[in-house]
Amino acid sequence: MNALHIGNLTIKVPVFQGGMGVGISLSGLASAVANEGGVGVISSAGLGLLYKKMSTDYFEACVIGLKKEIEKAREKTKGIIGVNIMVAMTNYADMVKTALAEKVDIIISGAGLPLDLPKYREALSTTKLIPIVSSSRAAKLICEKWKMLYDYFPDAIVVEGPKAGGHLGFKQDQLEDENFSIQELIPQVCKEVKEFEKIYDIKIPVIAAGGIYTGEDIYNIMKLGASGVQMGTRFVTTEECDADSSFKEMYINAKESDIEIIKSPVGMPGRAIHNEFLSKVKNGEKMPINCKFHCLKTCDWTKSPYCIILALYSAYNGNLNTGYAFAGSNAYRATKIETVKSIFNSLQLEYSAVVKA
């Protein structure tokens, strides 16, 4: 695989590790990926729960937690570290400001369109800003808005297809429609981006995400125009993944039929591994909740059957009876716990095998 250049950053292996919350990708996984030449990504979602001993104020604990995770990652690697910050988070602005103040290499932002992300950036900032989109229309809109309002273009764009894990930027009926597949989306976004590249003499690499699992997948999607890939699911079943071992075992024990689309309390479809908790939700059992955190702008807790942040936090801790695991469409393919290094070796071998074929 060729190195990926984003501004002054050289990514030796063009693989972004997906940001997975709550607590699935923290400094442990991110630093391990960065050490192998990829982009290690810390998820900022729910850090206030992980660092609740540092402050009784959830939002203050989130800021403390993000600073700590970036610091811990920096202690373990000299590689490239990014932070995933969801637009839907109530404390989005504070987390962006914190990541910029800590001079993180990259901010990746989705779960909504990050139309105002550049406004938090100071003139001398070297942090790269990368939006996540699910259509060429969204990519065009962000490029136009950022140029008009901030005279700034995305340093790269992540295009997330419908086979990704977690919350999905598609309607339910689009998830199995081939017209919305990542293989269709990448050429469309690349075509849109090329117009801006020609006019303004810039480079905006396009990163493919969602359903990419092997080196062969990487090769095939790059043939369609992608300059790199983002992979989350493949890195869950690693020794370095920050989740509890029970969370990882859920992936290993899952069958293809266990991967299902759920309706999330935030009003979006999501992909997860079926378990008893999700069965109870489907059967109409309302988990007793009162919203302590107000962590997501789009969540109406008065109409929700459960608190999503608590469910994901429980899963991170291995308590799958009170939570569940988000997962990509390929989660069932995991068969063992391995190291991040071994996965990178496999990806390289798989990629090379297709090139030589």
Image (cartoon, grey):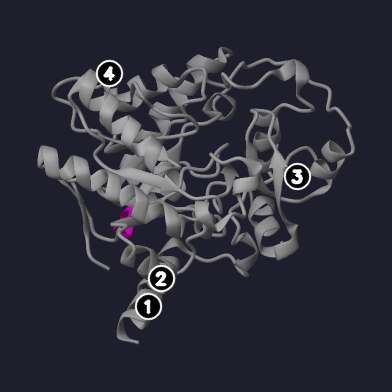
The earlier-in-sequence mark between 4 and 3 is 4
Dot 4 falls on a residue whose secondary structure is helix
Relative depth, front residue between 209 and 318: 209
For the residues labelled 2 and 1, say whether their Cβ atoms are less than 8 Å apart: yes
Task: Label 2: state its secondary structure.
Answer: helix
**Residue 136 at x, y = what percent?**
38, 43
How far apart, in angstroms, are the residues tagged by discs 1 and 4? 42 Å
Amino acid carrying label 1: it is Leu
Under tag 1, what secondary structure?
A: helix
Tell me the crowding category of disc 1: few under 14, some 14 to 19, or many 20 or more residues within 10 angstroms, Cα based. Answer: some
Where is residue 230 drawn, in percent x and y? 41, 53
Q: Quadrant of the N terminus?
A: bottom left
Q: Identify the residue position indicated by label 3 in the image.
A: 320
Say what amino acid the circle numbered 2 marks.
Gly
> Is 7 placed above or below 141 here?
below
Q: Are marks 1 and 3 in contact (CB under 8 Å)?
A: no
* SS for callout 3: loop
User: Does residue 277 show up?
Assistant: yes
Calculate the distance from the C-alpha at mark 2 to the C-alpha at mark 3: 31 Å
User: Which is nearer the eye, 258 or 195?
Assistant: 195
Residue placed farthest to the bottom in the image?
Answer: 357
Residue tagged 4: 119
The picture places residue 251, in percent across and down from the top left corner, at 66, 58
Between discs 2 and 4, the one toward the N terminus: 4
Q: Is residue 174 magenta?
A: no
Residue 349: mark: 1
The Cα atoms of the two marked residues, 1 and 3, are separated by: 35 Å
**Which span is picked out in magenta?**
34-39
